[in-house]
Image (spheres, grey):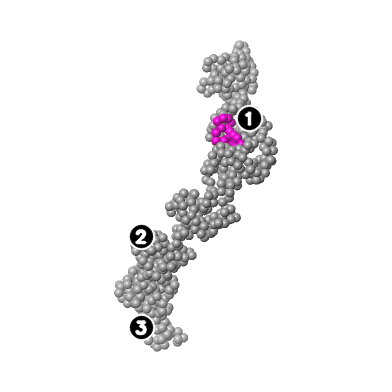
């Protein structure tokens, strides 16, 4: 750091002062903000500690409380050396030099811990307090705080580690965050490193099938931890606690319980022993041959789930009744909606036994009479029955027979009426209305029974056209004439209306006007299209005119002027054109 003093004076005393100032600020060239510098304690008062260092323009001042918090107040006196971090050479408001002993210690400590981490050296520290996810550790002599995750406190999860708080112990450095200045340590690594050699020798002495004694030390959601007489901790998974279904280990165990355990797995790589409690008990599945699929048994409900319920056939023998086996008519309904309760005893049919998978499936609906079978016994296709509407949607009605209240019959909107639009017909009915319907389909396997309202009201009017052929002449009565809709007609002897579009009214465009009719007239039409399966009938006046015109041309076309008396406005011109063609 160089200081240049400018002066236009040639006074010798000023020149001497300039040289002295330069030399004073050039003594310590390492003075920079952000560096740790060594200072000498010049004075200590009740509130402040005054420092000095070569190259500084004034004395830095430290708050005595900072030294007390660091435990240094009793270690320093006037003349002592103290390292501080030079934060600012000049405070923007006060002009004072800003230094910190605490930050200097942390900076020096961080440099040391980085080296220790690289060399895989442990640190000495104390657990200060619990925090979210673990504990806060003070690293002694480095002035740093570290995080100790709960999973790294001990080899087995600890619910309570109050006895470790305040004890001086070793920790392994497992992670450093250089940017944030965070340190993560582990007590488990230190414990494990000392025990590995001894633990391996102990575990090598066990084999699968051995029976050992253990004391329950901790219960978790996935199992129970037991401590053996030799100090080894082992896990007994929830699935190995009992043959019956266990929601949580605390249902059958308490901390401190002493139990015999069977070793079912030895892992020398992970140095772990797997144990089982249930394999020392009689297996209820050994007696499964006394039960037969298809028979009714009484069971006790143990647990209700979204997909069904678990029940106990006998102590330890747990079975599943899926929601699809609750009802013949209501698919996958929840157990709660049907009123099933935990602890309730009910009759079920043992549906299937899978010895390989050790699974037993139950059916509740098989204990009830199938409504579809009852319906099939009492009714047949073609029967007209009395029903009541119980539900409806945008395209159908659902009706029930009073004698079989749990069975819904399906009536599509297309089967409500032979006349009118389906959506308009559907709007005429509401839940609670009584209807007489005809059974159209009864499919027991697919659980589908279809009925029709219009079919129950008489024969289909479309059968009027059963013996009619294409191009047949049919006399109709005009029902109405609407410019947009067309000409609505009803064949004589038929109870069904049909629309003749404007394009099918006349062969002559000038006569294709709906306004020519007012209603009540009789008009002859021709059968243009017929599809009884699709219930499609198309009537046309235009086609009739075309057929009659062709017939007239064929019959009268050779006689001069013979067609002029026919009631067709353009027939004469057509005959003349045909004569001209014959002359040529």
Left or right, 339 with respect to 40, comes to left
Q: Residue at x 60, y 55 (%)?
A: 356
Q: Nearer the viewer, residue 548 or 412?
A: 412
Which callout, 2 or 3, points to the residue nearer the camera?
2
Residue 159 inside the magenta-drawn segment: yes
* Disc 2 from disc 3: Cα separation: 60 Å
Q: Which residue is mark 1?
A: 170
The tag on residue 566 is 3
- Locate the N terminus by quadrant: top right
Going from N to C along the chain, the mark reached first, 2 or 3, is 2
Residue in the image at 44% along x and 72% along y? 533
Q: Is residue 264 above or below residue 516?
A: above
Q: Secondary structure at mark 1?
A: strand
Chain part drawn in magenta = 144-164
**Mark 3 Cα within 10 Å, few/some/many (few <14, many 20+)?**
few
Mark 2 or mark 1, which has the lower sequence index? Answer: 1
What residue sits right under mark 2 in the picture? 431
- Image quarter for residue 406? bottom left
The answer to whether 233 is drawn above or below residue 454 in the figure is: above
**Quadrant position of residue 563:** bottom left
Real-space Cα separation, disc 1 to disc 3, in angstroms: 122 Å
Residue 328 rendering spot, x and y as whole percentages = 46, 60
């Amino acid at each position: 750091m160089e200081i240049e003093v400018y002066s236009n004076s040639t006074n010798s005393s000023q020149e001497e002062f300039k040289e002295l100032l330069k030399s004073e600020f050039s003594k310590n060239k390492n003075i920079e903000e952000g560096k740790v510098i060594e200072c000498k304690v010049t004075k200590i008062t009740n509130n402040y500690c005054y420092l000095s260092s070569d190259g500084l323009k004034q004395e830095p001042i430290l708050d005595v409380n900072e030294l007390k918090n660091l435990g240094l107040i009793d270690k320093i006196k006037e003349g002592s050396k103290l390292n501080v971090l030079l934060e600012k050479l000049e405070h923007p408001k006060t002009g004072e030099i800003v230094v910190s002993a605490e930050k200097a210690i942390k900076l020096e400590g961080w440099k040391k811990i980085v080296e220790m981490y690289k060399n895989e050296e442990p640190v000495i520290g104390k657990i200060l307090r619990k925090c979210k996810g673990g504990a806060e550790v003070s690293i002694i002599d480095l002035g740093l705080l570290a995080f100790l995750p709960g999973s790294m406190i001990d080899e087995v999860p600890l619910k309570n580690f109050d006895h470790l708080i305040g004890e001086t112990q070793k920790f392994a450095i497992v992670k450093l965050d250089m940017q944030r200045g965070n340190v993560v340590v582990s007590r488990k690594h230190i414990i494990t490193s000392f025990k590995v050699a001894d633990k391996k020798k102990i575990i090598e002495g066990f084999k699968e099938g051995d029976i050992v004694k253990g004391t329950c030390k901790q219960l978790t959601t996935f199992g129970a931890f037991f401590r053996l007489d030799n100090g080894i901790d082992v896990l007994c998974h929830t699935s190995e606690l009992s043959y019956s279904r266990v929601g949580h280990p605390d249902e059958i165990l308490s901390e401190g319980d002493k139990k015999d355990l069977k070793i079912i797995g030895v892992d020398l790589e992970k140095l772990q022993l797997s144990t089982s409690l249930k394999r020392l008990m009689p297996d209820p599945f050994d007696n499964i041959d006394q039960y037969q699929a298809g028979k009714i048994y009484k069971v006790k409900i143990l647990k209700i789930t979204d997909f069904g319920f678990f029940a106990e056939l006998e102590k330890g023998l747990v079975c599943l009744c899926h929601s699809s086996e609750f009802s013949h008519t209501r698919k996958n309904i929840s157990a709660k909606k049907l009123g099933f309760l935990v602890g309730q005893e009910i009759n079920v049919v043992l549906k299937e036994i899978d010895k390989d998978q050790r699974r037993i499936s139950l059916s509740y609906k098989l204990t009830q009479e199938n409504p579809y079978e009852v319906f099939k016994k009492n009714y047949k296709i073609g029967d007209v029955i009395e029903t009541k509407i119980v539900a409806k949607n945008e395209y159908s009605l659902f009706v029930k027979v009073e004698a079989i209240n749990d069975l819904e019959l399906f009536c599509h909107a297309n089967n409500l009426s032979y006349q009118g639009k389906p959506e308009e017909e559907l709007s005429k009915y509401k839940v609670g209305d009584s209807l007489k319907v005809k059974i159209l389909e009864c499919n027991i396997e697919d659980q589908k029974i279809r009925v029709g309202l219009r079919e129950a009201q008489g024969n289909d009017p479309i059968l009027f056209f059963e013996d009619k052929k294409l191009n047949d002449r049919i006399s109709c009565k005009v029902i109405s004439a609407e410019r947009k809709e067309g000409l609505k007609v009803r064949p004589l002897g038929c109870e069904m209306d049909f629309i003749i579009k404007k394009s099918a009214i006349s062969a002559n465009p000038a006569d294709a006007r709906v306004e020519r009719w007012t209603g009540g007239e009789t008009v002859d039409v021709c059968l243009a299209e017929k599809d009884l399966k699709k219930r499609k009938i198309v009537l046309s006046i235009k086609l009739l005119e075309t057929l009659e015109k062709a017939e007239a041309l064929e019959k009268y076309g050779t006689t001069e002027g013979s067609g002029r008396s026919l009631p067709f406005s353009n027939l004469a011109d057509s005959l003349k054109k045909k004569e001209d063609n014959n002359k040529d």
